[in-house]
Amino acid sequence: MTAQLAPEIRDLLLPGTLAWLDKPPLAPFIDGTWRPARSEDRIDVVDPGTGLTVTSYTASSADDVADAVAAARAAFDDGRWSELDAEVREEKLRHLADLLEADAGTVAQLEVLDTGKPLAEARLDIDEATAVLRYYAGWATKAEGSVIPAPRRFLATGTREPIGVCAAITPWNYPLPILMYKLAPALAFGNTFVAKPSEQTVLSTAYLAQLCATAGIPDGVVNVVPGAGATGAALTATPGVDKIAFTGSTRTGQAVMRAAAGTLTKVSLELGGKSPQLVFADADLDAAIDGVMDGIWTNAGQVCVAGSRLIVDRRIQDEFVAELVDRTRRRTLGHGLAPATTLGPLISAAQRDRVTALVEQAAAEGAHIRTTCELPEGDGYFVAPTVVTGARPGQTVEREEIFGPVLTVLPFDDENEAVGLANGSAYGLASAVWSTNASRVHRVSRRLRAGTVWVNTYGVFHPTLPFGGVKASGFGRELGSAAVEHYTELKTTVIDLSS
Ligand code: ADP
């Protein structure tokens, strides 16, 4: 099937992207081969920038999922990956990273067509995914064990062993990086893998599966089951999965955890957020305005760490918001592949409608709405960046994760009130403090209930920095050395030395 693309978009695509799109291997990838999905359920791949269906695929059924898990199980049990020397796993993962880097232009374009995000942002995603892969490739040879001080008669060791079959269920906002946070450590430590990408963004995961085969990662080590919630639910209910790493909404995370109880599968959950950015009057306001904008307009606010609540000293609120609105107006909404675009569309018509309805509800409840930027022509799913002032703490727009370009502003009169407002959320993923007062920075950072506190910056991700949430934002930390806990088991071996 030839990809359906707007002519002006087709003209912008690299030959490699076009070639791949004309024959995308969008099928379950099981034991090293693409197999026709055994269901009737067709899912469209839609370009959010135009609303056009690019291509479509058949969702993986529960039987396909069972086959993928069986393939991953067999690949684990016969040791074709876990029993390789760690240096060999490292080498293959580095080869995969080199292949991904070489194809970054194409993968970034696929990501734009799938997610709508501006090309420059997609390119950063691919670079980040590659960096995470290289970082964990290095870990393959570095997860050391210990000698445990047992009674003298014994020699006791603690060694790090792979868990077995690890599964990932991933969302549509950062398809490749979020997959890589899970896949890279899992493979480095010798586990095998089943990935279930979001139904709305399957292209980059399928591309990566193909690269895994080229990199010489043995068949059955990486399997992919494209599909929607039913495919994900099948994965959580299939025996033989030892660990599920989930990133997505809090509600679905709860469903995953409930299902995992049935099979006693370990879970880690990276869920939603409503992250506060606290701006004190003593901050470098110029930098803070840019930081707050990046925190909420990046990926059109469809970011789990979106800094969607600006909590600002009342004395500077008006000036700060006026300048922020002014600078936001200089951004350009458009198709992610158009060179001038700095802000893309939302992922789907449903998401656009949901975000728009939440803003309308806020207005009906008395909040003041400032929209910025012209909407482009056409049928893309665009929402103008929107700043909401005058909402009450706890009001829907201030409480709910919106996952769109909507910033709610709450003023405070003193530091205690600022911290109270910041922590007055069910979520606890990220937060930021903008201040030049060193004591205040330490005091406030310590009191914020969030997995990450950024100080005088926002949204810094790096392979070495553990990331995850507290409260309704989930549990478990991805990235950095924290992943050792998640993708290995600690084995205690006790040897009686007396015989
Ligand atoms: P959103 O609402 O933002 O799309 P979700 O949390 O529903 O986020 O989706 C995140 C991932 O979870 C996607 O890959 C989706 O297909 C998957 N998913 C949805 N429902 C379920 C479920 N019941 N069990 C497992 N995975 C699911």
Image: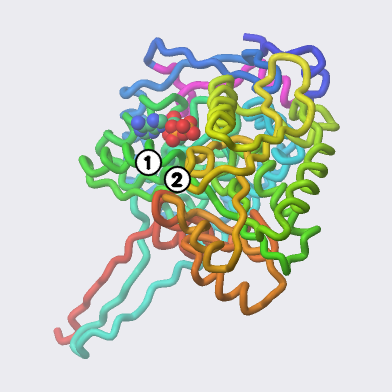
Number of numbered markers:
2
Q: Earlier in the sequence, mark 2 or mark 1?
A: 1
Q: Secondary structure at mark 1?
A: helix
**Residue type (three-letter) at the residue carrying disc 1:** Gly
Q: Is residue 257 above or below residue 86?
A: above
Residues under numbered marks 2 and 1 in contact, where contact means CB atoms less than 8 Å apart: yes
Residue range highlighted in magenta: 15-37
Specify whether tag 2 is near ligand 1 (CB below 8 Å): no
At x 76% / y 24%, what residue is drawn?
375
Q: Residues within 10 Å of mark 2 (few under 14, many from 20)?
A: many
Residue 220, image x, y percentages = 42, 37
- Return the residue nearer the eye: 496 or 99: 99
Specify whether tag 1 is near ligand 1 (CB below 8 Å): yes
- Return the residue nearer the eye: 356 or 123: 356
Quadrant of the image containing the N terminus = top right
- How are the colours assigned in the image? rainbow
- Position of residue 314 in the picture relative to residue 320 (left or right): left
Q: Quadrant of ligand 1?
A: top left
At x 79% / y 26%, what residue is drawn?
374
Taking the magenta stretch, the answer to whether it contains residue 24 is: yes
Label for residue 253? 1
- Return the residue nearer the eye: 445 or 12: 445
Circle 2 residue: 271
Quadrant of the image containing the C terminus = bottom left
At x 64% / y 54%, what residue is drawn?
459
- Return the residue nearer the eye: 214 or 301: 301
At x 65% / y 65%, what residue is drawn?
455
Asked which quadrant contains residue 116, the reply is top right
